[in-house]
Image: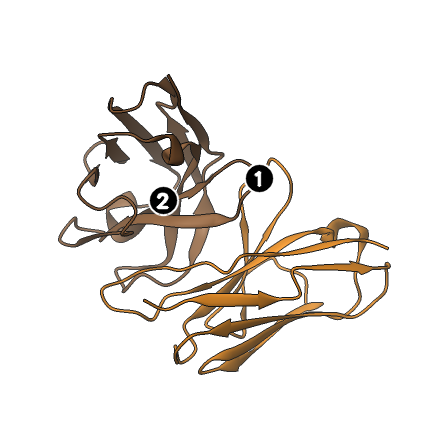
Chain colours: A brown, B orange
């Protein structure tokens, strides 16, 4: 079935780096834009980044711009989020999510992973 | 940047009640609005996209309306499984910034 599975979360010290992965299955990964969305403990949802289906465009929330990099490997059906210079305020559950429409401008997110927790603490 | 607000922030309701949640954008977003339901410890679930289109598999008691800056999500007859937090999300800005509203918690009266 259609599925997204995140991995790579954990506890990391401020200023360090971490890379999250999102493995996709059950659909043509290379046809869909993909997103990272995060949720700090007890807080609401915050969109983090998007990458177009072919990797041609990438956009970021201001809060992570210059520190985080979204990428994808369509041959491996995998989405990534490289997080550098981590701060305490980056502590959150990180979800990957799929665009609703294939080969189209990003719109809504119809498939979500289960999330992976990132804790930034000394 | 486009800001999203939701009201109320929380609502207490009973099974069978009609519940309406409002979402407002700081500038016009046409119909580029989606609604999600999230239960504790779970990923969000898409309910409505393009302001009023029901996502496949979502019960018909959920409906969305609005365009421009003002939108509503209505649950026509609240069911026990509907107690959750609901978020709106816009997708109209450029560069793309998919802003979520702060959420509305629906709990049991």
Disc 1, SS: loop
Q: Residue at x 37, y 35 (%)?
A: A90
Residue A11: x %, y % from top left: 39, 18
Q: Residues under labels 1 and 2: Cα distance?
A: 32 Å
Q: Is residue B63 above or below residue B13?
A: below
Q: Residue at x 36, y 59 (%)?
A: B98
Disc 2, SS: loop
Q: Residue at x 30, y 46 (%)?
A: A28
Q: Compare marks 1 and 2 and give the one earlier in the sequence.
A: 2
In this figure, which residue is indicated by the disc labeled 1?
Answer: A42
Mark 1 or 2, which is nearer the eye?
Answer: 1
In this figure, which residue is indicated by the disc labeled 2?
Answer: A27
Query: Is residue A16 found left or right of B62 in the rendered image?
Result: left
> What chain does badge 2 belong to?
A
Query: Is residue B31 found left or right of B78 in the rendered image?
Result: left
Residue B78: x %, y % from top left: 79, 61
Quadrant of residue B16 within the rendered picture? bottom right
The circle drawn on residue A64 is none
Residue A104: x %, y % from top left: 27, 64
> What chain does badge 1 belong to?
A
Q: Residues within 10 Å of mark 1 (few under 14, many from 20)?
A: few
Q: Is residue A104 above or below residue A12?
A: below
Q: Residue at x 30, y 23 (%)?
A: A14
Quadrant of residue A43 within the rendered picture? top right
Task: Please count the marks in the image.
Answer: 2
Depth check, front residue: A95 or A23: A95
Q: Contact (CB < 8 A) between labels 1 and 2? A: no
Q: Is residue A90 above or below residue A15?
A: below
In the rendered image, which quarter contains the C terminus of chain B?
Answer: bottom right
């Amino acid at each position: 079935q259609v599925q997204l599975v995140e991995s790579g979360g954990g506890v990391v010290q401020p200023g360090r780096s971490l890379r999250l992965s999102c493995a996709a299955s059950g659909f043509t990964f290379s046809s869909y834009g993909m997103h990272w969305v995060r949720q700090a403990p007890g807080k609401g949802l915050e969109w983090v980044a998007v990458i177009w289906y072919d990797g041609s465009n990438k956009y970021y929330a201001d809060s992570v711009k210059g520190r985080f990099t979204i990428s994808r490997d369509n041959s491996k059906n995998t989405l990534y989020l490289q997080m550098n210079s981590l701060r305490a305020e980056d502590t959150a559950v990180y979800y990957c999510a799929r665009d609703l429409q294939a080969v189209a401008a990003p719109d809504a997110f119809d498939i979500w992973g289960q999330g992976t927790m990132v804790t930034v603490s000394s | 940047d486009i800001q999203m607000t939701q009201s109320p922030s929380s609502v207490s309701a009973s099974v069978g009640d009609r519940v309406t949640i409002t979402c407002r954008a700081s500038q016009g977003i046409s119909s580029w609005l989606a609604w999600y339901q999230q239960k504790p410890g779970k990923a969000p679930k898409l309910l409505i996209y393009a302001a009023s289109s029901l996502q496949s598999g979502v019960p018909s008691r959920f409906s969305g309306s609005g365009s421009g800056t003002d939108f509503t999500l209505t649950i026509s007859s609240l069911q026990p499984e509907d107690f959750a937090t609901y978020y709106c999300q816009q997708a109209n800005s450029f560069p793309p910034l998919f802003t979520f509203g702060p959420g509305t918690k629906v709990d049991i009266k």
